[in-house]
Amino acid sequence: MKILIADDDPISRRLLEKTLQRAGYDVVAVQNGMAAAEHLCKQDGPRLALLDWEMPELDGPAVCREVRKKKDLGYVYMILLTSKGLKTDIVTGLGSGADDYLTKPFDSGELKARLRTGQRILHLEGRLVEARENMRFKATHDSLTSLFNRGVIVELLGREISRSRRERVPTAILLCDVDNFKPINDSHGHLVGDEVLQEAARRLLLSVRSYDYVGRYGGEEFLIILNNCDPASAPRRAEEIRRSLSDTPVQTSIGPLLVTMSMGVHQTANWGARTVEELLHQVDLAMYAAKAAGRNRISFTKPENSSDADHRVPSEAEQSLR
Amino acid sequence: MAPRVPYLSFWPHAIVFICIGGLSPKVFSEGANEVNVATPSVLNIKDLLSRVDNDRELVSELFFIFKSVFPSHLQRLSDAVAKELPNQVEAESHTLKGMLLNLSAARAAAIAADLENMGREKRITGVSEVFTEFQSEAETLLLQMESVEFQQ
């Protein structure tokens, strides 16, 4: 484990360095408080630190205060090590944000024991953070496909439309529905249906850019948000996404299945006063139009007002694409 | 003018023990017949070795570092005493105290602590006398360090 030693006394620094290296730590040694704070405030900096109290530029308690200010950092376990030994010093040191306090000259056994305590705290913190991240993921992602769930993708859509309005940049909304999904489930069972949805999700994710959004909107429906999508390229992008599923059969436990999807697309930079729900309704209608036109195709929304027309895709693309 | 640091004049007279097989047994001995070795409380080698997991090479290295940095610290302390600058007396004494404690030099560390307290309390009266005592103790300590030889 990486540990930082900050001490302007070269004897103390060397003594600590050797003691901790021997105990298996990866030691970073610095001579002043400013350098210590810089190391500890790095995202990948040491999470365990031994700080001398009296140091040039920034003393030990000031380093503790600087580190504690950084709320986005993982927890840093800091031990003040000094020849100050008064009760008031201990109170001041711990009050600055230090976790523990050792007086010089340190006993190597006691030092190592206290560092093990620090490691236990850090390990516990790591497990708590991991559990919190797992819970956050579960709360925001669909358990079957690992895509954003409906709540999150709709929220992202709202944010993206606000951004698009503000910056006057076009955004495309794609609502995709796997064709004939109920017959797949009925004929081959729900496990195969799940395999189809998982593979469809994987291919959708692979067919968009890293800054686009893909979410599971409903049972076999997926919502895609293409940020900064140039009006001329939207039909091509939508077609590539449609073909990502239809061109290659999905490998399932009962063998390959040819799976397609129908898609409704709305693309503009001029959103008017429409709400997210209204926009989704429009895209939904377009998607059902693609279904009605024979499935495995794309249908674009109809313009609602003249201002929208400027950002419409070419007229031939408004027809169902196949 | 700041007082001259007299410990340097002791170096030519330092008695060096050439020991074969590791740490000189004289250093460990507390017997009255052992000469040229300061009393154990000046430099408690047993305590120091136990704190560094018996790493004699490290002790040699620490002594070397101390001998390298000590003169400049002592000179700054000497200047602060001569100029009656209590804040500097406190700061330098504190630094020296930390070093000496790490080296298990309890007596010198205790005198450095006295100087530190005097500096903190802005007590100038008597500080020269305590500083002289510290210098004397430091000379003894340096002599003892010289006497401790480790097998390379």
Image: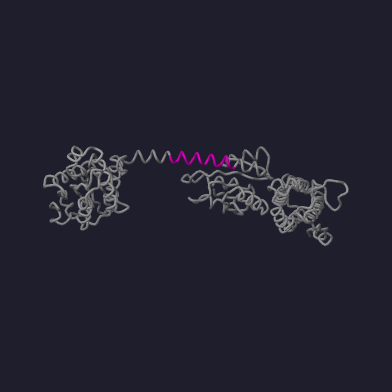
Say left or right for A173 vs B103.
Answer: left
Say left or right for A16 vs B27.
Answer: left
| Pick the front one: A321 or B139 | A321
Q: Residue furthest right?
A: B33
Q: Residue at x 17, y 40 (%)?
A: A183
For the C terminus of chain B, the image quarter is: bottom right
Residue A121 within the segment the image draws in magenta? yes
Residue A246 within the segment the image draws in magenta? no
Say left or right for A131 vs A21.
Answer: left
| Pick the front one: A232 or B131 | A232
Is any part of residue B91 visible from this angle? Answer: no
Name above or below for residue A128 compared with residue A232.
above
Q: Which residues are magenta?
A: A115-130
Please name the colour scheme applied to the rendered image: one colour
Say left or right for B148 vs A23.
Answer: right
Expressed as whole percent of the image width and height from the top left, the position of residue A64 reads 56, 45
| Pick the front one: A184 or A25 | A184
Label total for image: 0
Q: Residue at x 57, y 54 (%)?
A: A35
Is any part of residue A217 visible from this angle? Answer: yes
